[in-house]
Image (spheres, rainbow, N blue to C red):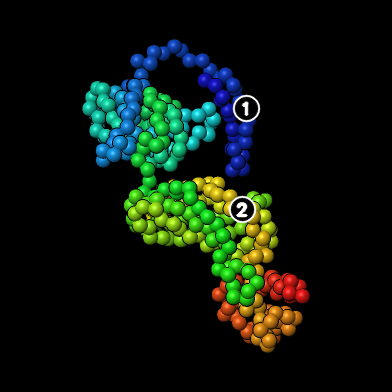
Amino acid sequence: MKYLNLYKKEEGVWNYKDSKYEAYTTLSYNYTQFEKPPAYFTGNYSDFGIDLNNNSLYDYLVINVSIYANTKGTYQISGEIYEDCNSWDCKLIDKAKNEINLTEGMNLVQLKFDGKEFYKSKYNGKFVLNNLQLIDKIGIVDYKYYATRTNSSYNSVQFEHSDVLIIGNWTSEQYGNYKDGNKTYKFLLIQVDLNASKLGEYIVTGEIYDENGTYVSNYAANLNLTGGINKVAMKFAGKDIYDNGISGNFYLKNLYVKNTYGKNLDYKDDAYALGYYNYTSFLLAEECMDFDNSNGMVDIFDVVAGLEYLSGEKDSVANYECLKHNMGDLNLSDMFKVMHKILDLS
């Protein structure tokens, strides 16, 4: 017996008092002297893919697990399958469990892992079955942290793909030109192609980052996709880009397609490099900045009207609905944009 520790409870706190690294050596025992477990893993495994719809793609990767039962009854088997890698944090592909009725003696049971998860992983090679567990109505009967490595190597494209895939085609552009003629835009528009094998409603989300790796804006929408190629227009608010205050290359990241239950169908962590954009291209429209509505121009009187509104001296400003629709409620940051606009026009 090793790592024997002694603690004493003092004023409600357990305080360490002593320890022994090698505390005691028992008499000799044979494992056959002890009660047999109701069932246990024999260590024999095999694996294969199943194609359920005859399209030459595997719907499941199946691992056969051999179990010897000393006691017949109902058990539950579960396991996790990972990429076979040399790192301690190898990527989890999928989990599976199965309720089984074991007879006395040798039993062969199956764990089925979803083929779509292997396709999404884009991993090619062998896979590792970890955290293999067998339980009965009382508790854990047998457990293997590392169970086995698949006998065969698999390619991700051998498996059934998700209902929607991000197929790689994309464009980006400034979009929604304001009417003031100064080439300022409401949105950064990114169009991506999704291939849907099953029509229906899906959730598409994404984020853009500047060249310093700083988060800038996000997009999320529930979209109805038709079968085949769908061109999805993702509009990122120009206000967010302007407020970030950085010109340079922008990047679309964390592009996800999910079903309405939130299950991830496909994703690209680092999706696309969008090219160079100047944040001043997303200035507030001049027509919204005419807060005093006096001459149709942006001038110092609009700054005065805006500050009076912010201070509470006025209940509103001219063109408030235009401002609210395009940029949200008026704030001090917007006033600096008005002054920036005046300097640009001077």
Question: Mark 2 — residue?
Answer: 275
Q: Using residue 180 as the reference point, say whether residue 71 is left or right of it.
A: left
- Which residue is drawn at the image coordinates 58% and 28% (left, top)? 5
Numbered disc 1: secondary structure: strand
Q: Are marks 2 and 1 in contact (CB under 8 Å)?
A: no
Looking at the image, residue 218 lies above or below residue 33: below
2 or 1: tag closer to the N-terminus:
1
- Residue 256 drawn above or below residue 181: above
Q: Which amino acid type corresponds to the residue marked 1 in the rendered image?
A: Asp
- Residue at the location (43% across, 28% down)? 126
Q: Nearer the viewer, residue 29 or 92?
A: 92
Residue for badge 1: 18
Give the camera-side residue of 112 and 335.
Answer: 335
Side of 213 where 93 appears, left or right: left
Residue at the location (61% across, 82% down)? 319
Q: Quadrant of residue 241?
A: bottom right
Tell me residue 157's x, y (percent): 39, 37
